[in-house]
Image: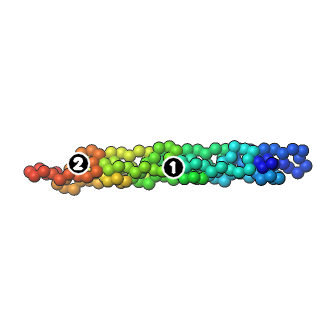
Amino acid sequence: RSGRWSATGASSCSDCDAGKKSEAGASSCESCAGGLYSVGGTQNCTSCVPGTYSGTGAEACTDCDAGKHSSTGASSCDACTGGSYSDAGARNCSTCLGGTYASAGSESCSACGSGTYSEDGNSACTKCDSGKWSNMSESACTACASGKWS
């Protein structure tokens, strides 16, 4: 039966440990590769679902940390790029909206301060040009009205 093994001269077969697999008639068990896991006594290892990862010989997959993401069968998680963020266990990163920003590997977006702005997906805020202004969390600067300056 698959998922079991025996040594030469053995009187019975033993289940493979969690994190390992075997074919029928095996004399040993093999570790599951990174991105895969097994609960033991199995022929095949199972791929980690998106938002999780595993190292070699894993019994289970682990959620990616906040600020990271993964696809199916990942052996590690990738950091979100600048201008995006994620919660723990994310399959994808979300884009920061205008008026907010995030550096690479962020778990949330931060608001741009007064006098600065950002467009969707920016990793930093930009200062308003002379003659323009903005409140906090703005996606554009506004020109000063006639008779006013900045």
Inspect this view and state whether residue 125 appears. Answer: no
The one nearer the camera, 72 or 133, is 72
Inspect this view and state whether residue 130 appears. Answer: yes
How packed is label 2: few (under 14 Cα within 10 Å), some, or many (20 or more)? many
Residue 28: which disc?
A: none
Left-right relation of 114 to 25 = left
Residue 91: which disc?
A: 1
Indicate the secondary structure of the residue bearing disc 1: loop
Q: Is the residue 88 above or below the residue 27 in the image?
A: above
Residue that numbered label 2 is attached to = 134
Nearer the observer: mark 1 or 2; the answer is 1
The residue shown at (38%, 49%) is 96
Residue at the front extreme of this rendering: 1
The residue shown at (75%, 45%) is 41
Q: Amino acid at mark 2?
A: Ser
From the top left corner, tell me how far across and down residue 57 is, in percent: 68, 49
Q: Amino acid at mark 1?
A: Arg
Rendering colour mode = rainbow
How packed is label 1: few (under 14 Cα within 10 Å), some, or many (20 or more)? many
From the top left corner, tell me how far across and down residue 31 is, in percent: 71, 51
The residue shown at (43%, 49%) is 94
Give the total of numbered labels. Answer: 2
Task: Quote the CA–CA distance across marks 1 and 2.
Answer: 35 Å
CB under 8 Å between discs 1 and 2: no
The one nearer the camera, 122 or 45, is 45
Going from N to C along the chain, the mark reached first, 1 or 2, is 1
Left-right relation of 149 to 134 = left
From the top left corner, tell me how far across and down residue 110 is, in percent: 36, 45
The residue shown at (41%, 44%) is 108
Residue at the left extreme of this rendering: 147
Left-right relation of 125 to 129 = right
